[in-house]
Amino acid sequence: MKAAFYAGTTGLIAQQNAIDAVGNNLANMTTVGYKPEEVSFRSLLYNHMYANTDDKPLTGYGVKEISTGVDFTAGQYQATGGALDFAIQGDALFAIQNGGKTEYTRDGQFGISVENGGSYLVTATGAYVLDKNLQKIQVPYLNTTTIDTDTLRDQLGLFTFRNPSALAPNSSNSFTATAQSGPATAAAGATNTVLSRYLEGSGTSMVDEMTDMIQAQRCYQMCAKVLQTADEDEQTINSLRK
């Protein structure tokens, strides 16, 4: 019966994590530039079936949830007319400085931070937007009130990764480079362009997420049933020993 307990318990944990991921994706249906997290599973194989054979095949009980990365499929582009709204056509990301660390985002809904007489481009959370040299960007003006949108657009730093789906998501709709994603490199202008006065919508698909939610809930119920049945069998066995 221990195998049933292991299988049921690990299944419950894995499916709960999958449900949490779906819930987070659905909660960000309207978040600008949001990229949904993808989840898959792998078997827990840890015991040798036949110790005296050369290949020593493995067996195990249960399953583990693993994050397979982030889906960077482009969302829909929406015209906003905002002078500080930008969207990327291509697979590049904006670079930002958040808490002294360099992070990357597809969220181009920017604002202005006035400091010591200078105006700096920032994200909605207050992180500095960086240029191609990873320096803070001072907002240019055509006159005292009108932002020079074209010059500002050209100042934005765009960066790509060898494996962007392996970037680590942060809570502020941004990502951190990992060993699997590879380091950031300056994006090629021919394949990545910045649209001014546009924003990229969330990449979350309601239909896909609801399908994943139903599947995870059904699997969760099945794992709970496995545990219930195993517990009832244990009670029956223990009663026979008395």
Image (spheres, rainbow, N blue to C red):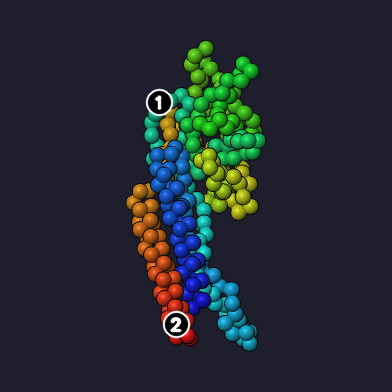
Q: Examine the rendering and report whether any part of residue 89 can be seen.
A: no
Residue 70: horizontal and vertical position, in percent?
Answer: 50, 50
Q: Is residue 100 visible?
A: yes
Is residue 144 or residue 41 the one in the foreground? 41
Whether 127 is drawn above or below 213: the answer is above
Q: Is residue 211 above or below residue 230?
A: above
Tell me if label 2 and label 1 are in contact, CB under 8 Å. no
Residue 36 location in percent, x, y?
45, 48
* Rendered location of residue 174, percent (x, y): 54, 41
Residue farthest top in this picture = 144
Q: Residue furthest front?
A: 242
Residue occupying image coordinates x 57% and y 80%: 57
What is the secondary structure assignment of the residue under circle 2? helix
Label 1 packing within 10 angstroms: few (<14), some (14-19), many (20+): few
Residue occupying the point 52% across, 51% down? 165
Say which residue label 2 marks.
239
Element type at marker 1?
Answer: loop
Instruction: Classify residue 201 by image quadrant.
Output: top left
Numbered circle sitting on residue 47: none
Q: Indicate which disc residue 81 carries.
A: 1
* Residue at mark 2 to residue at mark 1: CA–CA distance: 74 Å
Foreground mark, 2 or 1? 2
Between 142 and 58, the one nearer to me in the picture: 58
For residue 120, side relative to residue 219 (left or right): right
The residue depicted at 54 percent of the width and 77 percent of the height is 59
For image coordinates 40% across by 47% down, the residue present is: 26
Amino acid on which the number 1 mark rests in the picture = Gly
**Residue 197 versus residue 233 in the image, above or below:** above
